[in-house]
Amino acid sequence: MRSAKDVYDFWFIEHSKEDWFAASETFDKEVYDGFASTHGAVTRGEGFVWRSTPKGRLAEIIVLDQFSRQLFRDKAKAFAYDSMALVLAQEAIGVGADKQLTEIERSFLYMPFMHSESLVIHAAGLRLFEQIGEEYAQFEHRHIEVLQRFGRYPKRNAALGRNSTPEELDYMQASAQRMF
């Protein structure tokens, strides 16, 4: 298993939002080549020692929340660890670890709230994103609007084996370039 520092450096120093949100096969391969075994260890709970520092907690959440999406793009497993990441984020917030992170670091610690399909979780997430900036809060509002409209993220339907409604199909066709 690679270290929390390896995860942190890969995510925040070696890469940026151009990689994080591009859905690139090249970036997905980098994550796979460098961190597939680390992902497996973290999903088994073996990253618990990372929780001794705020950045270590963040690294564990990135592995579960972000790396899962790169490693298993367009598959149900991409979302399989969302609840685990959310619980770890809630725990980190509960002990104040988020307050020791920068704005961009906090945004990734809070990302499991945005990835949830629960409006209850999004209500808490919105308050968190509002604390770090209007841009983050606006993005969270757009996610909430999708959930209020459909009760779920339609773009996950195929991967999760869910049937899409005609309205969801229209939405996905109209928003083919959007991430959610």
Image (tube, rainbow, N blue to C red):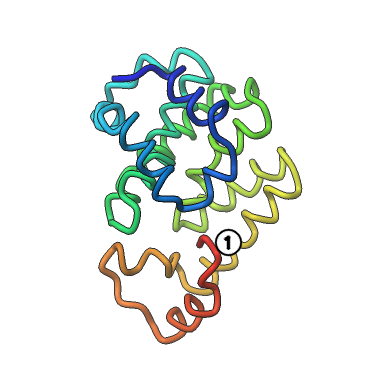
If the image is split into quadrants, where does the N terminus sit?
top left
Tell me where residue 26 sits by quadrant: top left
Q: Would you identify the image quadrant in which residue 161 lies?
A: bottom left
User: In the rendering, at what x and y percent does residue 7 appear?
Assistant: 44, 25
The answer to whether 1 is drawn above or below residue 14 in the figure is above
Q: State the residue at coordinates (60%, 38%).
A: 107
Which residue is at a point 35% across and 41% down the rendered structure image?
Answer: 29
User: Quick one: which residue is furthest to the front in this view?
Assistant: 26
Residue located 36% across and 14% down the image:
49
Q: What SS does tag 1 mark?
A: helix
Left or right: 108, with 5 as reference point: right
| Picture layout, residue 27 above or below residue 153 | above
Left or right position of 47 against 111: left
Q: Position of residue 76 (x, y in %)?
A: 28, 56
In the rendered image, the residue lying farthest to the right is 134
Name the image quarter holding residue 140: bottom right
Q: Which residue is mark 1?
A: 144
Report the number of numbered marks. Answer: 1
Q: From this view, report whether residue 124 is shown above or below residue 88.
A: below
Viewer-proximal residue, 142 or 119?
142
Q: Nearer the viewer, residue 163 or 92?
A: 163
Amino acid type shown at disc 1: Ile
59, 31: nearer the viewer: 31
Which x, y percent locates residue 167?
46, 84
